[in-house]
Amino acid sequence: MKLSIAEGLYLIALDDEEGRLLAAAEKTYIDAVLSAVILELYILKKITLTDSVIKVVDTTGTGNLVMDKVLHKLHSGQRFLDEIQNLHDYFKDVKDDLDELLVHRGILRREETKLLWIPLSERMDNANYAFEQEIRNMLQAMVFKSAKAPQAFIILLSLIFDCGIIDEVFKNKDDLIDAVKVAKDIINSPELEPEVARILGELRSYFGK
């Protein structure tokens, strides 16, 4: 995936027509983005996870604004879900950072609605849909073709399901039924490292409450 897991999740969570977060994602996206970032930091070997406990082992920057902010706020010795809750309020404006990151990359574009010269509202327009389309294509291949996917995409599909926005990718009712079946079982994928599978299982329960 050319984008981080968190960026891919955020693009799916944005309503392409309205340019704003989908209503279904409003209550879950902060914790989901934090989860995506921490799991990617694990894949990048910036942290270790042992029985869901985080240990920071490398604070060298990743070059990604959001990931580096999270990395420098992580506490060794904290359990994954506890750390998500600890960081939630600090990252309540993470949407702004994601917007900045994706605008800088030319993927999103800010558009303002004005009355005369007075700004009334702002929306995020998908200026380069190819990135999101690539993500959607891979997710659909995982469901319909049983395509073998990198860990990052497995994490992404699981979090999209947890956020209740899987129907944004699979809009046909029959396709959605198949997608839900795959997403529910994805945490048991042999492609997942045991610690990642453990965390995704815990997140499934966490978001399901």
Image (cartoon, rainbow, N blue to C red):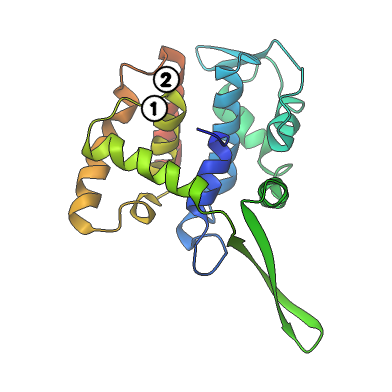
- Amino acid type at circle 2 is Arg
Tell me: residue 24, above or below residue 189: below
- 150 sits to left or right of 83: left
How many numbered circles are shown?
A: 2
The percent position of residue 171, horizontal first and vertical second, equals 30, 58
**Residue at the image point whose x is 66% and y is 51% from the top:** 106
Tell me: residue 128, above or below residue 139: below
Between 75 and 116, the one nearer to me in the picture: 116
Tell me: residue 121, above or below residue 58: below
Report the disc number at residue 90.
none
Q: Residues within 10 Å of mark 1 (few under 14, many from 20)?
A: some
> Can residue 207 be seen from the camera position used here?
yes
**Residue at the image point whose x is 42% and y is 32% from the top:** 153
Asked which secondary structure carries label 1, the reply is helix
The percent position of residue 112, horizontal first and vertical second, equals 71, 73
Between 131 and 207, the one nearer to me in the picture: 131
> Can residue 209 be seen from the camera position used here?
no
Q: What whole-number distance in Å separates the C-alpha atoms at marks 1 and 2?
A: 5 Å
- 104 sits to left or right of 174: right
Report the disc number at residue 201.
1
Asked which secondary structure carries label 2, the reply is helix
Instruction: Name the outermost residue toward the bottom.
Output: 116
**Residue at the image point whose x is 31% and y is 42% from the top:** 140
**Residue at the image point whose x is 31% and y is 29% from the top:** 186
Instruction: Name the outermost residue toward the left.
Output: 174
Whether tag 1 and tag 2 are in contact, CB under 8 A, the answer is yes
Q: Residues within 10 Å of mark 2 (few under 14, many from 20)?
A: some
Q: Which residue is mark 2?
A: 198
Image quarter hosting the C terminus? top left
The percent position of residue 125, horizontal first and vertical second, equals 60, 63
The percent position of residue 155, horizontal first and vertical second, equals 44, 31
Quarter occupied by residue 67: top right
